[in-house]
Amino acid sequence: MKYGGIYIHVPFCIKKCPYCNFYSVTKLSYINPFIKSVIKEINNRKNKSFIANSIYFGGGTPTLIQPDMIAELISAIRNNFTILPDSEITAEANPGTINKKNLPLLKEAGINRLNIGIQSFNDSVLKTLNRIHTAKEAQTAYYDAKNAGFSNIGIDLIYAVPGQTLKDMIKDFKKAVNLSPEHISGYILTLEPKTAIYSDIMNKVLNKTGEKLQSKMFLSAVRFLKNSGYKQYEISNFAKTDRFRSAHNLKYWVGEAYKGFGPSAHSFDKKKRHWNISDIKKYIEKINRDKTVVKQSETLTTEQKTIEFIYLGLRHAGIDIKNFNSKFKTNFLANYNKAIIKLTEEKLIKIVSDKCSLTEKGMLFADYAARILICDRSLKIDFYE
Ligand code: SF4
């Protein structure tokens, strides 16, 4: 049996990073009413037949709230859903908000996995990203987490930051590997419209990292992490062993059910998806007045399910052809024949033992490959070796 996951969106940050488009606010006076409201939302959606093996506190900055509040939330979750023993309970942690004092308390509260958003070990890159911590503080935060007894720690890095060189990036990955965390995520900086960094690039205040350099950086990061003993299990995610893959994030990639609580949180029951309003004030008011906080919901059509199966399959373990054929009553190799030939000739996908997966080069063009498979075969792009 496959199990579901529980997600809590903690929408608070000390200040907004210029590249981030996750929903969060800097008005920390909302924290107390938020905790009360989210507990009420959890109670309202009680369902003991929902069995989960992962809880994930994301945000925002979950480590901005007090460990006893995290404990309260975990207890509400346990009271309303069936949480298996040994479940993975993760908190995203900003190095500027964790220390010798709160880390042992977070562990006591029930957190058994930390995902630390270090982003870079280079102060000038951290400055461009307007992070609230220095490289030294990030390293100290990691050691403090180790000393507090955390034995499952992930480090997030961002690269292709304006001004960052290939050498700078490799130094970051070397430092991360030297710390020997159980998990490393390396993300190419995404320029999301409506973010400050996007405007700075549009207004030529900052220079966008060219696609050629981005490609080189991606391939160097993947090769370096693989040579350092980390196993790639998704385009940007690497774990020391299978046990240390993110049990929660895997649910998104394999299409498992999850329940999300808090403003902007999404939920999925394998057929229907719904998401909450992205407004802390309205969220609290509506919960207080016993009104729904769901902004919208959609029932996935067969077409949407097919698209997601292809898109997520390519990003994660590859499209399982037998599974695809039985699920969608089709013949993948015959029906997608033209796209498969095109993408294979372009050396972007490979088919081995009933799995259609991206090549190393294909990972750079995952969205394009998915689009070609789904329908659009007219796209033209340049490839970089
Ligand atoms: S701390 Fe994290 S969630 Fe908050 S603004 Fe920065 S990147 Fe976004």
Image (cartoon, rainbow, N blue to C red):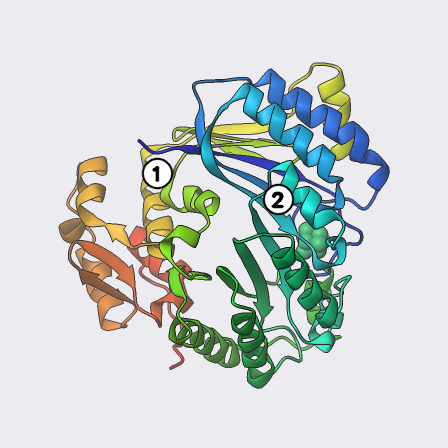
Query: Residue 209 at x, y = what percent?
Result: 59, 77
Could you say whether the residue bearing mark 1 is in a helix, strand or loop?
helix
Q: Is residue 212 left or right of residue 79?
A: left
Q: Is residue 111 above or below residue 171?
A: above
Q: Quadrant of the C terminus?
A: bottom left
Q: Is residue 39 left or right of residue 211?
A: right
Query: Residue 318 at x, y = what percent?
Result: 29, 55
Residue that badge 1 annotates: 305
Q: Quadrant of the N terminus?
A: top left
Q: Residue at x 18, y 37 (%)?
A: 326
Q: Which is more toward the observer, 146 or 131?
A: 146
Query: Residue 343 at x, y = what percent?
Result: 26, 66
Give the quadrant of residue 373. bottom left
Give the quadrant of residue 275. top right
Q: Residue at x 27, y 72 (%)?
A: 347
Q: Which is more toward the observer, 27 or 103?
A: 103
Q: Is residue 372 above or below residue 122?
A: above
Residue that badge 2 annotates: 58
Residue 279 seen in this snapshot? no
Density class for disc 2 (Cα within 10 Å; few <14, some 14-19, many ≥20) is many
Residue 134 seen in this snapshot? yes
Density class for disc 1 (Cα within 10 Å; few <14, some 14-19, many ≥20) is some
Amino acid bearing label 2: Gly
Q: Which is more toward the observer, 53 or 214?
A: 53
The Cα–Cα distance between marks 2 and 1, rounded to whole angstroms, is 26 Å
Q: Residue at x 47, y 74 (%)?
A: 221
| Label 1 lies in ligand 1 vicinity (Cβ under 8 Å) | no
